[in-house]
Image (spheres, rainbow, N blue to C red):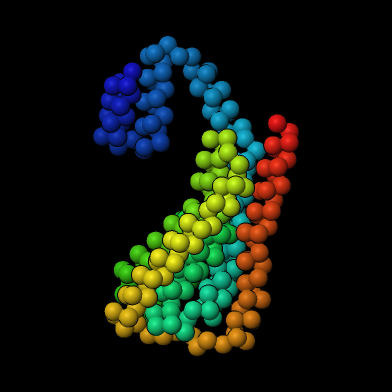
Amino acid sequence: MTLLLFGLFFLFMLLGVPIAFAIGASTLYALHQSGVPLMVVTQQMFQGINSFALVAIPMFILAGDLMAQGKVSEKLVSFADSLVGFMRGGLSVVSVMAGMFFAAISGSGAATTAAVGSSLVPELKRKGYDPASAASLIAASGTIGVVIPPSVPMIIYAVIAQQSVSKLFLNGFLPGLAMGLGLMAIAIAQAYKRQYPKGTPLSLSTIWVTFKDASWGLMTPVIILGVSSRGSSHLLRRR
């Protein structure tokens, strides 16, 4: 069965069949040849998605898209710029910090990269930063979106492994912070090596103004963690 499954899969791939259809078609045919009723496949598919926790995934993606369209990402970028923009190469550090902020809102690495990159890549190029280096730094900071809660892969893992979503979220903060600090250190080292310019001067009034503008976006992870914690406790009590 294994040989048949992988043989059909690679055959479909060589014929140019999209990978999702290649996986599905080869699996269905292999199961049919093994005598497994195809009705069982349908039942298992619906059983696999019959989970209340999985409802959070489209909601997180929707929240990230709404905030990206509502210019929340730009407010987060402005707040990050007011904090670390005064450093040499501060704009590259801002891109990492803004990625961490937005990652804690959207829960998706792709959404984080798209939202932060659309705001910062043109500005980085205008300030004389190497385009390839800037794009790779923002793409790398977008990967923090799967570590800093709320995280879509964490929810999927929690559902599959029957683990607490809130505990996984709480344990994701320190690794995400460590990843962000590591990327900031790389950005600062590149800035001094390539003599990138300094950014916005440090000003407490600017920090306060930008913090007020970005406050609702910054509160989103706290709200989500609170809701997920209560939801997990409720499900445990029901069990």
State the image coordinates of residue 21 (x, y, percent, origin top left). 40, 33
State the image coordinates of residue 210 (x, y, percent, origin top left). 61, 78
Measured along the vertical axis of the image, is residue 36 above or below residue 27? Answer: above
- State which quarter of the image contains the C terminus: top right
Q: Left or right: where does residue 19 sit relative to residue 103?
A: left
Measured along the vertical axis of the image, is residue 180 above or below residue 206? Answer: above
State the image coordinates of residue 43 (x, y, percent, origin top left). 56, 22
Among all residues in the image, which is located at the extreme top? 35
Residue 146 can be seen in this image: yes
State the image coordinates of residue 237 (x, y, percent, origin top left). 73, 36
- Residue at horizontal 49 percent and vertical 18 percent from the top: 38
The front one of 170 and 50 is 170
The front one of 56 and 195 is 195
Residue 145 can be seen in this image: no
Q: Quadrant of residue 107?
A: bottom right
- Residue at horizontal 43 percent and vertical 82 percent from the top: 87
Q: Left or right: where does residue 100 sit relative to residue 183?
A: right
Measured along the vertical axis of the image, is residue 143 above or below residue 79? Answer: above
Total marks placed:
0
- State which quarter of the image contains the N terminus: top left
- Residue at horizontal 36 percent and vertical 38 percent from the top: 18
- Residue at horizontal 29 percent and vertical 79 percent from the top: 193
